Amino acid sequence: MSVPKYWREIPYHFRLEGGICEDCGKAFIPYRHVCPYCKSRNIRHAEMPKTGKVITFSILHAHPKGFRKQAPYVVALVELDNGARVVSQITDCEAENVKIGMRVEAVFRKISEEGPAGIIKYGYKFRPVFQNQLKK
Ligand SMILES: [Zn+2]
């Protein structure tokens, strides 16, 4: 991803911003101009809740460019507490401990590094809410 594109997407990366449809009330992330549920264009920007649960996940052993140091890693479909769904990496948790239905919260982390110049991107990942209890 180019730097200008990344810059434009900062509201999404930094504030976990999405949209809420004023007609059907559904929330989604990232923000879209047309509601994916009812096709309404009556959408307002909204900050999303930072907690949710894991709907489904995959453990990835291969790694896309920029993720080299992180394999294997877990990518999950997370349903936030307002119903919006977001695909995100799960962090601070061993891959074998990730479970469907697990409560997770958004944390701000380094996402990837690009090339030797190392453009470091930051954004949200999700980690288990009861992290300390899982370690016991
Ligand atoms: Zn709608």
Image (spheres, rainbow, N blue to C red):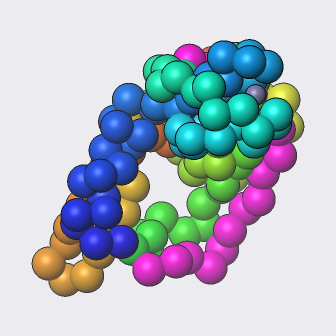
In the image, residue 79 sits, relative to residue 129, either above or below, namely below
* Depth order, front residue of 114/132: 114
Task: Give ligand 1's quarter of the image.
Answer: top right
116 is higher (above) or lower (below) than 108? below
Identify the residue shown where x is 31% and y is 44%. Answer: 10
In the image, taking residue 38 as reference, residue 8 lies left or right, namely left
The answer to whether residue 94 is magenta is no
Quadrant the C terminus occupies: top right
Nearest the viewer among 45 and 97 is 45
Q: Point out the stretch of residues depicted in magenta.
A: 49-65
Q: Quadrant of residue 114?
A: bottom left
Can residue 80 be seen?
no
Residue 126 screen position, x and y as percent: 56, 36
x and y percentages locating residue 8 in the rendered image:
29, 52
> Tag count in the figure?
0
- Identify the residue at horizontal 65%, vertical 55% (top origin): 74
User: Residue 82 or 26: which is nearer the viewer?
Assistant: 26
- Front-lying residue, 104 or 40: 40
Horizontal side of 17 relative to 58 (left or right) equals left
Q: Quadrant of the N terminus?
A: bottom left
Residue found at x 66% / y 17%: 22
- Residue 134, compared with residue 110, is above or below; it is above
Is residue 12 visible to the viewer in this orientation of the structure?
Answer: yes
User: Left or right of 55: which side holds 66?
Assistant: left
Residue name at image x 65 percent, y 41 percent: 34
Relative image position of residue 132 (x, y in whole percent)? 56, 20
How far across and down, in percent of the image, does residue 99 sit? 81, 38
Q: Quadrant of residue 4?
A: bottom left
